[in-house]
Amino acid sequence: MIKRCLDLGVAGTLLLLSAPLMGVVALAILGTMGRPVVFRQQRPGLGGEPFYLNKFRTMAEATDASGRSLPDGERLTGMGRWLRSTSLDELPTLWNVLKGEMSLVGPR
C-alpha cells in the first residue's frame, strides 16, 4: 500500500514536471522518424499477466530487399541513440507506473 502510494506520487510528479520535455521529444521523433512516436511492447507483468510497456521510439522501421527487418544496430537512429544514452526513451513508462502495471522500485 505504501509502495503503491509512493509510486503514484513520484510518477505523477515526474510526469507533470517532464511533460514539456516529453512534448519536445515527441515532436523531434515525429519530425525525424514520423509515426508512431511511442513504441509499445507486450511484456510479462506481475503474476505473468501481460501488459504493454510504453517507450519513445528509437529505431526506424527499415527492411532489407526481402522485407525482413534489419538488425537493431542498423535501425537505431541518431536521435534514438541520444534518447537511449540519456534514458529519455524511458519517460513514457511513467504511465505504466501510474496504471499500476509497473513499479519504480523492484524488478522490471
Image: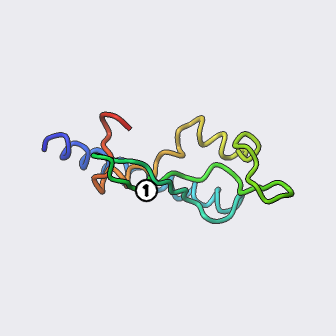
Q: Tell me the residue at 55%/52% (across/down).
A: 56
From this view, report whether residue 99 is shown above or below residue 44: below
Expressed as whole percent of the image width and height from the top left, the position of residue 6 reads 21, 42
Q: Quadrant of residue 83?
A: top right
Residue extending furthest toward the right: 65
- Which is more toward the observer, 91 or 48? 48
What residue did someone put label 1 on? 52
Residue extending furthest toward the left: 1
Could you tell me which quadrant the N terminus lies in?
top left
Q: Amino acid at mark 1?
A: Tyr
Q: Tell me the residue at 64%/40% (across/down).
A: 82
Q: Tell me the residue at 38%/50% (across/down).
A: 94
Expressed as whole percent of the image width and height from the top left, the position of residue 100 reads 27, 52
What SS does tag 1 mark?
strand
From this view, report whether residue 40 is shown above or below residue 5: below
- Which is more toward the observer, 101 or 50? 50
Expressed as whole percent of the image width and height from the top left, the position of residue 70 reads 76, 48
Classed neighbour count for the residue bearing mark 1: other residues with Cα under 10 Å, few (<14), some (14–19), many (≥20): some
- Which is more toward the observer, 75 or 64? 64
Q: Quadrant of residue 35?
A: bottom right
